[in-house]
Amino acid sequence: MRMFTNLLYDICTVFELFKEGESPRDKRKSTDFGAHQRFWDQRYNELSHIIDAEGVYSLEQRRIIFSRYEYFYYMMNSYPVYSTLKSEYIRNYFLKSFGVVFIVLDIYNTYRPENETGFYYHIYNFLQKSYCPCLDYSGTESDEAAVKRYLREYLAELGFNREDFRENGKMYELGKYQGTIRKGYGKRKSLMKQYIKACKNEYKKDYREKKLDKSELDRILNNIDKFYYAFYSLSILLDMQRKVKILDSIAYYLRVLIREGLWVHGLYGYAARYLYDFNIFDTTPYARALLERFHEFESGPKGALTRYIVSLDDKSQEYIESLKDMVFNLSDKKSYDDVYLENIINYFEQLQNARGYVTRCYMLLAVLIYLIRRNKLHKALRFYDESPKYELPSGYLPGAFSVLRIALEIKLNREKIKHGSLFELLDYVKAYQDAFMDLRVVTDPAYNEDEIQYDANNFTLMRVIKMYNSMLANISTKSDIQPPYITGLLDNVERALDKINILIDKERVYDGETLAELITENKILSSRESKENLIGLFTGRHKYTLLQCIEKLGVLVDYVISPVDDIKNVMMLYGNNAENKNRRRLIYNALTIICGDDTKNNQSDPR
């Protein structure tokens, strides 16, 4: 997650989306992922307005595209590549390659030839110029020289001449600014606007002095605006090139795409359907096909990774995929047993040379799962902490180990966990969890349950608990060893609801206002139960008070209860049963009144 967040902040820096007073460094360092999400929630629309001001895609569709970029990043990270190369090199290679694919596609899909002020208009045309750096032709000018040449040609096309840019010319300042394009010199949009304004004022002065008529002034001002859009978009392109060196690749593949069109079963065809098909909810099969096709090519005779790829037999690949499903898959319930885990361990243990090198960490994961399922938790924790710290291969392993390490910490040391102590491990879970779909039934759309996803660290912690408990439930054992589930997270909520439910049944209450009065008069709830966080594991700026737990009940039940939790009072409020929904609404309304009264009392307190 932090890696993807840093990537987003790089984009934000290039497009100058930081507001005055915002510190990019502080933003990057923050561990509050809710703050990251709120920041990007605001910036997504701004970025959409820049790259697609004409609205080829709606803001809602752009948000879908952005979210699919993020999901693909996680899928890419977790995709296993069996290689002797360092995982960081493979990740960067994949990121750069798919970055080219996605940028080229967005240029291709968003460009409109009639819109000369569109962000991609001049990028699209520049990339097709013979002097633009390109993979298939090395005799081109430098990046900066090519952009300067394009801008000179465009100025001439707009009717400006060299005299306008000489010392006494009306475009002199702008010409000086345009001439400063050089390696390492990024343009500031705000500064560019100042020069544009100064040039316009020179022509407006001529108009006031009757040297220009209105139509001529309007034409010139419009052409200056056109030049601004050209300069701005190509400056962004140069800034990107300085960071990641992909200009020649973008130029090459855009030309291929324009010349040959989208082949539906090629890389660009799969990418287009994954990103831009808005008629289906889940486009991840196209993303998987894209990854598989890319890996197939890179592992083939012409691929850049061929000489470093380690060929694994079908059994090894089956076991690696099974371990991934055991930890991460919450949708497709597959059953395993401890004998199957023993087979994985024994099989990987006997592999030698490069195959043994690639699979040794998967064997360690199988051992860790086996120990946990046998309820040898302290031994599992020691095994994790004392295992050789091999560099993990490219794929899902960093996320899988982090899930189990967090779960062991919760199971063995829950009361000692301090705020922020799990953030680093949670980062790995977010970045390497793949894109398994969490399918859940919304029990009552009246409650804003999905808002919980913006509490990123705690929501990831909930997913870790569910993954861990689901993993244990899906692995059977011949002995009588009970699965060591994470339990009891809703016990405080259960006890509070037990008292409220007894009161409701005793007094036969049917409205929230009456229930609120009875709870207050009879002091049914302690101060902690009515105001404080009832799930101590979840920390941060969001408090999981009783009211919040009732509001987010569907998500909490789906994620943090175990098969052995006894929470009958909680379950009386859960589900689509009319009686349960009415009981939940009754208690929710009463708690809303109580919490509102507490807020008013605190505000009026003279202290």
Image (cartoon, rainbow, N blue to C red):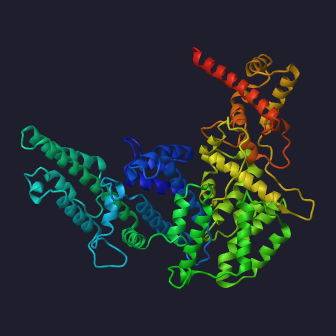
Tell me if residue 243 can be seen: yes
Q: Position of residue 164 (x, y in %)?
A: 11, 54
| Residue at figure coordinates x 14%, y 41% from the top left | 214
Residue that protrudes farthest toward the top in the picture: 606
| Residue at figure coordinates x 75%, y 68% from the top left | 366
Tell me if residue 409 can be seen: no
Query: In the rendered view, does 165 fall on the left or right side of 323?
Result: left
Q: Residue 119 occupies which quadrant of the picture? A: bottom left
Q: Residue 162 occupies which quadrant of the picture? A: bottom left
Pick whichever, 275 or 590, lies toward us.
275
Query: In the rendered view, does 590 fall on the left or right side of 89?
Result: right
Q: Is residue 485 above or below residue 530?
A: below
The quarter in which the N terminus is drawn is bottom right
| Residue at figure coordinates x 80%, y 65% from the top left | 370
Q: Is residue 197 above or below residue 73?
A: above
Pick whichever, 274 or 487, lies toward us.
274
Q: Position of residue 415 (x, y in %)?
A: 74, 44
| Residue at figure coordinates x 40%, y 71% from the top left | 249
The quarter in which the C terminus is drawn is top right
Pick whichever, 427 or 556, lies toward us.
556
Q: Is residue 562 above or below residue 362?
A: above
Marker count (numbered)? 0
Query: In the rendered view, does 166 fall on the left or right side of 121?
Result: left
Q: Position of residue 589 (x, y in %)?
A: 71, 26
Pick whichever, 474 or 359, lies toward us.
474
